[in-house]
């Protein structure tokens, strides 16, 4: 994807310069007349004051404090209260650039300040709607994209005959285009001039998606949707270039949204991206309190970035592989190529991604070690995985190859161990059992696990692992029997194997079952019960998503056993197995046996026009705050708001947006929470997320921008210290 700097970006809509100047003069005059009794008490590590415009105090706007004096760029953001007051707490000693940003405004003048000062800020009213819209979240722009009407599907036009409207949306949203990067921020709603000159915007878009090492996959995605995909994207950017603006306006932060504090640090580098980060053990979030954060660089690099948020320093660890001559984790079988298909407007022909470990996701265990879904060797499996092996799992379902295994890293000793798994890995989650079992997704036709207690005792990878095919109890006798294959009809005398590869993986905290999600349209959730002697005793259940929901992506489970999922339909979905009324096994229990278990909650933000009530939000992943780390309550489900520039929590019957207003374009693929100090109140806890866009240069700031680590905290009021 590409970018250009619009006239708005330089704050110079030439025809409105006089209006802006007059607005600024009036605001300064008002600030000079402001009631001097309206002050904010500050400590020696705070900056506080009042934000006013020519309209008076500005409530619900962001105040941003940024410094480059520390080893890494540091940003802290707060929201003004109903009297326009703000307080940025706990700032490291440095000189900060401080300014106000908000809906209905353009960025006000920046003031240089040090902690311990009262700093009143001048907010600048937007001279027109176009200037104001520059600061809207991506969803307000992306929802302007035209979605084909229902009557254009079914082979009646330039769309593949078998494609449904929900398929189209699934592909244009979080299971397709927005699965890798945000759409709707300035860099994607405009065409980069350096891309070249073209006879039409359709030609420009066709060339645009040929850029870089993900080109083949962008092209394949859009080609599979038919020629209308490129045509509609071109129409979208054409209309924006001609001055069309979003159909709706965002509301300023309200209620608890004004109590949110966001702190961010640069880390890694400007040419590589992060898929994710991890801060603590999900089961016990006090693990690694105040400790380092670890990034997952996926296809971009073999260097694991490490951020110390106390010292404000960033380092890295070069992760090795067991087999030095293994191929790069790029090319066939991967969603990243060895070389750019066509030059990038940003980096030309330069090969940016050059990795072997392909670390997609990591987890911190109870002792602070880092467990990684990472390749340690080439794709061919050892003999103990294959037919003829004595390994119980291999006897039942032999495996010939996989692309990613497990590694474990001790941050204190720098010891990095290779664990050769037969099954592929993608996401990792620890179970709640005595063996500290590490469950994985990414195994395709199987679900795999590692007995970490046994691994630590023996370092025997074969002995410590297991995997199972997904077998439904379609004969209803409560045990695993001979089964028919996925392409065979149900036989009421046998069980049935299904191919339902786990994307997310979620060990239940209540009954020893393990849940997973199946991406796609409509998608499904799967429950696996290991039984007393897995894999021989392991059975599965599958529950498809009914309309209006569709398009499962990532998800999590709460302490009651309810599963929560991000959906391409623009919903947060939940599945509660306890609500099921019919039989959960037997010949009819093949996916559609419990629609009553599903509930749907629409994400915030505008929807596409002409397709009914919807949200264009394309959430990548959902995480459940089982321990009330953030402060909105125990078991609150929270999603990545990939077009809302932040995170979204569903608490007390409403959606709460945890927005990152600067830099514009924040896009997370996952997050977790940590309690640094249980006795420190709101200051000792918070959520952690990385800006996970595959192209960090698409964010505000453009080329040279680095990935960000973000800490979200919730204080009791907008002025709490």
Image (tube, grey):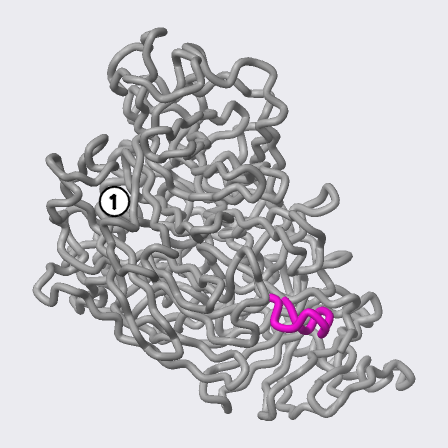
Toward which corner of the image does residue 662 lie, by quadrant? bottom right
Toward which corner of the image does residue 364 lie, by quadrant? bottom left
Residue 93 shown left or right of residue 243 in the figure: right
Toward which corner of the image does residue 120 lie, by quadrant? bottom right
Crowding around mark 1 (Cα neighbors within 10 Å: few <14, some 14 to 19, many 20+) is many
* In magenta segment, residue 677: yes
> Residue 89: in sight, yes or no?
yes
Q: Residue 525 versus residue 399: which sits nearer the camera?
A: 399
The residue wearing badge 1 is 423
> Residue 199: in sight, yes or no?
no
Q: Is residue 284 above or below residue 431?
A: below
Q: Which residue is rendered at x = 53% and y = 81% of the image? A: 74
Residue 102 shown left or right of residue 179 in the figure: right
* In magenta segment, residue 102: no
Residue 668 shown left or right of residue 379 in the figure: right
Q: Residue 18 versus residue 169: which sits nearer the camera?
A: 169
Q: Residue 604 versus residue 247: which sits nearer the camera?
A: 604
* Quadrant of the rendering where the N terminus is positioned: bottom left
**Kind of element beneath mark 1:** loop
Q: Which residue is rendered at x = 51% and y = 61% of the image? A: 281
Q: Which residue is rendered at x = 59% and y = 25% of the image? A: 597
| x then y, percent, for residue 338 | 14, 58
């Amino acid at each position: 994807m590409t970018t250009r700097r619009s006239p708005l970006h330089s704050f110079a809509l030439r025809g409105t310069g006089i209006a802006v100047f007059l607005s600024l003069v009036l605001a300064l005059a008002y600030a000079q007349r402001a009631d001097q009794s309206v002050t904010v008490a500050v400590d020696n590590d705070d900056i506080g004051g009042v934000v006013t415009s020519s309209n008076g105090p500005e409530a619900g706007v962001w105040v941003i404090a940024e410094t480059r004096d520390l080893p890494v760029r540091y940003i802290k953001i707060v929201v003004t209260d109903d009297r326009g007051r703000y307080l940025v707490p706990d700032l490291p000693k440095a000189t900060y650039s401080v300014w106000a940003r908000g809906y209905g405004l353009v960025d006000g003048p920046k003031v240089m300040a040090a902690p311990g000062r009262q700093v009143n800020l001048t907010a600048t009213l937007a001279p027109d709607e176009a200037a104001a819209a520059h600061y809207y979240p991506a969803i307000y722009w992306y929802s302007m994209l035209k979605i084909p009407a229902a009557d254009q599907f079914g082979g009646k036009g330039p769309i593949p005959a078998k494609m449904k409207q929900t398929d189209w949306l699934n592909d244009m949203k979080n299971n397709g285009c927005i699965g890798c990067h945000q759409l709707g921020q300035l860099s994607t709603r405009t065409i980069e001039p350096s891309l070249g000159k073209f006879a039409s915007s359709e030609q420009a878009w066709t060339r645009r998606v040929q850029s870089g090492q993900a080109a083949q996959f962008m092209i394949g995605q859009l080609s599979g949707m038919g020629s209308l995909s490129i045509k509609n994207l071109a129409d979208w950017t054409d209309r924006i270039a001609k001055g069309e603006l979003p159909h709706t306006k965002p509301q300023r932060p309200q209620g608890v949204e004004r109590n949110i504090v966001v702190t961010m640090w640069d880390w890694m580098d400007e040419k590589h991206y992060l898929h994710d980060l991890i801060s603590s053990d999900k089961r016990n979030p006090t693990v690694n309190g105040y400790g380092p954060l670890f990034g997952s660089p996926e296809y971009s690099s073999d260097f694991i970035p490490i951020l110390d948020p106390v010292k404000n320093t960033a380092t890295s660890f070069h992760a090795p592989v067991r087999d030095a001559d293994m191929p790069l984790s790029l090319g066939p079988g991967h969603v990243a190529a060895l070389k750019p298909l066509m030059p990038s407007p940003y980096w030309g022909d330069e090969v940016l991604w050059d990795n072997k470990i392909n670390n997609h996701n990591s987890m911190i265990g109870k002792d602070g070690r880092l467990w990684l879904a990472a390749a340690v060797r080439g794709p061919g499996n050892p003999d103990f995985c294959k037919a003829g092996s004595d390994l119980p799992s291999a006897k039942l379902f032999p495996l010939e190859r996989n692309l990613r295994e497990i590694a474990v890293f001790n941050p204190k000793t720098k010891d990095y161990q290779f664990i050769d798994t037969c099954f592929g890995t993608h996401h990792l989650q620890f179970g709640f059992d005595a063996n500290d079992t590490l469950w994985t997704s990414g195994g395709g036709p199987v679900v795999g696990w590692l007995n970490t207690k046994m691994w630590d005792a023996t370092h025997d990878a074969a002995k410590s692992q297991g995997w199972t095919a997904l077998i439904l109890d379609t004969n209803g006798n409560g045990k695993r029997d001979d089964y028919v294959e996925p392409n065979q009809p149900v036989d009421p005398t046998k069980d049935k194997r299904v191919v339902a590869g786990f994307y997310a993986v979620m060990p239940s905290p209540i009954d020893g079952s393990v849940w997973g999600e199946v991406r796609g349209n409509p998608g499904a959730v799967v429950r696996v019960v290991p039984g007393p002697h897995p894999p021989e005793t392991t059975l599965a259940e599958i529950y498809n998503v009914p309309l209006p929901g569709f398009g499962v992506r990532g998800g999590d489970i709460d302490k009651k056993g309810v599963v929560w999922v991000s959906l391409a339909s623009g919903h947060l979905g939940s599945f509660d197995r306890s609500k099921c009324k019919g039989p959960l096994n037997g010949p009819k229990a093949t996916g559609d046996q419990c629609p009553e278990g599903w509930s749907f909650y629409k994400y915030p933000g505008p929807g596409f026009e002409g397709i009914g009530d919807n949200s264009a939000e394309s959430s990548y992943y959902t995480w459940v705050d089982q321990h009330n780390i953030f402060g909105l309550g125990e078991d609150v489900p929270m999603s990545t708001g990939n077009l809302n520039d932040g995170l979204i929590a569903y608490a007390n019957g409403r959606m709460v947006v945890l927005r990152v207003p600067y830099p514009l374009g924040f896009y997370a693929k996952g997050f977790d929470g940590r309690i640094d100090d249980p006795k420190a109140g709101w200051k000792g806890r918070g959520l952690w997320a990385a800006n996970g866009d595959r192209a960090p240069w698409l964010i505000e700031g453009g080329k040279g921008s680095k990935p960000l680590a973000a800490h979200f905290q919730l204080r009791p009021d907008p002025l709490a210290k």
